[in-house]
Amino acid sequence: MNDMLTILGPAMAAGALVLLTHVALGRQVLARGIIFIDLAVAQAAATGALLATSLLDHAEPWLQQTCALVAALLMTLFLHELEKRAAAIQEALIGGSFVVLASSAVLITSQDAHGSEHIQNLLAGQILWVDNPQLWALAGSSAVALLGMILGTNPLLRFYLPFAIAITAAVQAVGVYLVFASLIFPALAVRLLPTKQALASGYLLGIGAYAAGLLASLQWDLPTGPVIVVSLALVMLVASRAMSIAGRARIG
């Protein structure tokens, strides 16, 4: 039991910290109709980290994090401008940005013997190996992002910059796939609920999905990040169906 807590405790803490910002940000993403923004920003952060690793031998974690954050901030500033100047084709350009960044990441690491491993780690994540410095970075970034969402007076301060800060730390800890799943699936599951109830329900559903995914991964010796992604998707489908049935029952 103690061994299980030692292995799963930090991973659950990482998931809880990621969900703390991602459930609220996911609702904003759905409301704005820019579903793939998280993939673009997450990929920008991942590409920034890979660039630091490629250009500097044995780059310190803080330097990787700084490069990732700068890349994510630049991407969010670009996307903020797109919202003002090209809203009609914003989603297409966001998708295009993701493809270009993903291809750039492959090119950056093409001469690195461990390049494919670096990319795989940033995509699927290594949540089971999250350490205390990463948890502190997640906690700090979550606090800053939440303050921005609460106190921000315009879309740049209330959404885009908090988004970049939250995504950057999350990518380093849990990977691109799990960042997307944490942002979109809980928000989809509770999209029909009032704001406060939706945030609380989305967070609880997300926590339950993380716990189920971690336990399933440990039980069947499966890759942890992908298992949690599937768990989040299944929870979203079940919760959405249950809420739809409950809604029809109330109407009837």
Image (tube, rainbow, N blue to C red):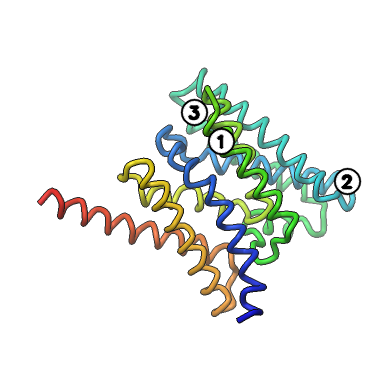
Residue at coordinates 66% horizontally, 40% vertically from top-left? 44
Report the residue marked by disc 2: 56
Instruction: Give whichever of 126, 54 is nearer the camera.
Output: 126
- Give the percent coordinates (x, y) of residue 216: 51, 74
Left or right of 210? Residue 110 is: right
Residue at coordinates 30% horizontally, 45% vertically from top-left? 192
Q: Amino acid at mark 1?
A: Gly
Instruction: Say which quadrant the N terminus sits in.
Output: bottom right
Q: Nearer the viewer, mark 1 or mark 2?
A: 2
Q: Residue furthest top?
A: 85
Q: Residue furthest right?
A: 57
Q: What SS does tag 1 mark?
A: helix
Q: Earlier in the sequence, mark 2 or mark 3?
A: 2
Q: Amino acid at mark 3?
A: Gln
Compute the Cα span from label 1 to label 3.
10 Å
Q: Residue furthest bottom?
A: 1
Instruction: Give whichever of 196, 236 is nearer the camera.
Output: 196
Q: Amino acid at mark 2?
A: Leu
Q: Earlier in the sequence, mark 1 or mark 3?
A: 3
Compute the Cα span from label 1 to label 2.
28 Å
Report the residue marked by disc 3: 90
Rate crowding at label 1 as few (under 14), some (14 to 19) or many (20 or more) other CA atoms within 10 Å: some
- Give the percent coordinates (x, y) of residue 157: 58, 27
Report the residue marked by disc 1: 96
